Amino acid sequence: MSFPMYVLYSALLAAALVLGLPYWLVQALRHGKYRAGLTERFGFVPARIVGDQRPAIWVHAVSVGEVLAVSPLVERLRQEFAGHRVVVSTTTATGQKLARNRFGAENVFYAPLDFGFAVKAYMRALHPALVVVAETEFWPNFLRLTKATGARVAVVNARISDRSLPGYRRWRNSLRRVLANVDLFLAQSEEDGRRLVEIGAVRERVQIGGNLKFDVPPAIDVPVVQQLRQALRGAGPVLVCGSTMEGEEALLLRAFENIVAGQPRAVMVLAPRHPERFEKVAELLRAMHITHWRRSHWHGEPLGGGVLLLDSIGELAPVYALADLAFVGGSLTGHGGHNILEPAQFGVAVVTGVSYENFRDIVELFRANDAVRIVGPAELPLVLLDLANDETARRALGARAAATLRQHAGATERTLRALDALLPAEARTLP
């Protein structure tokens, strides 16, 4: 982009913000969305992150999935570059909560909106030597102004989804100038690397780093898992259905009715993707006359022959450890799917829907190793019933999933070594 184009882009962004104000206000009032961190997003740097005079390594991770993916990398950066402070920004409230728990509130903040005044405020406060962006946050002003400070810029765990590729192609000429501000792209796969070059990334700056999500350690020693393990004694099989979207819960609950008819102690843990849908799913459970408990009102009572509605935030990933069988949602109704690695790391048999383009490379890898079952709405009930009734097949499928994950770990180390080359040798504190 030329400078006039950046001015036009900023004006259009401001117009979109103003025109969308009624929607944002409704969402804020009805669901509490977008209120958290509002001042931070507009460039008011929170006092809690000011004071440390060391140059910063700024890692940006949009939401929970990205925060989880970069967590091992953040810890390694802290170890290897102790002369720098490592700070983390997020876009969503759920990502912010997780990041503060993991890295400390004094190192975490909401990412500024892509206005020059907001971005510059953080540049002045943090003096970043390196900015690391997870996946594909190609914000024009942010990248341009970061580069203008002299900081190096890296995009890690980069991927270009099937859904976003056509749009990027249309804007390739403008995008090429934006991506010229990035010193290094570490793509998840060869295909993602090819797509980055196609949309305008400099070929010599694109490397294949692998997928950081393969290196995320499982979270198992948490209170909810201990509490559920006790409550599930004598129950089973346990089916954990995670990140479900509208239209999927009814299909899954009808399938569960078939399972519980033959196995009266079966349990489903049902975790809708979006908190604003918790009440609607509870209403569906009542309408279907299915025995159920809500996590928000559950105090450890024994479970069996019903559904636990996981109406909480941040508890799904460790709960997969208790599953005999997992369904990963957002994949039956055209939303592109969610992360099948979360159950796979526990050796759980995984089922997902035919819409998995958001995690294309991961699902195809597992599919090639016969380590996942992919179903459409029509096949879902029978596949779940068969796996629920066949422990041998279930265990074998889960074992292949765990083995596939182990074979493809190591992206964190590759990413660290590539980032190391962007900083001067004197910045390192480890050989």
Image (spheres, rainbow, N blue to C red):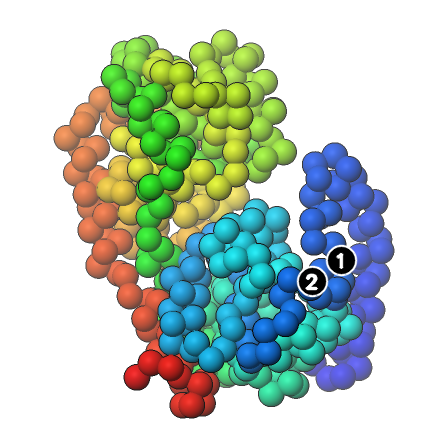
Circle count: 2
Crowdedness near tag 1: few (<14), some (14–19) or many (≥20) residues, C-alpha within 10 Å: some
Viewer-side label of 1, 2: 2
Q: Which residue is mark 1?
A: 39
Q: Residue at x 67, y 75 (%)?
A: 125
Q: Quadrant of the C terminus?
A: bottom left
What percent of the width, then of the height, locates residue 248?
49, 30
Taking the image as shown, residue 6 lies to the left or right of residue 155, namely right
- The answer to whether residue 171 is seen in the rendering is no
Asked if labels 2 and 1 touch by Cβ distance under 8 angstroms, the answer is yes
What percent of the width, then of the height, locates residue 420?
40, 81
Q: Amino acid at mark 1?
A: Thr
What is the secondary structure assignment of the residue under circle 2? loop
What percent of the width, then of the height, locates residue 341?
34, 48
Q: Nearer the viewer, residue 357 or 59?
A: 59
Q: Amino acid at mark 2?
A: Pro
Q: Nearer the viewer, residue 164 or 61?
A: 61
Q: Which residue is mark 2?
A: 46
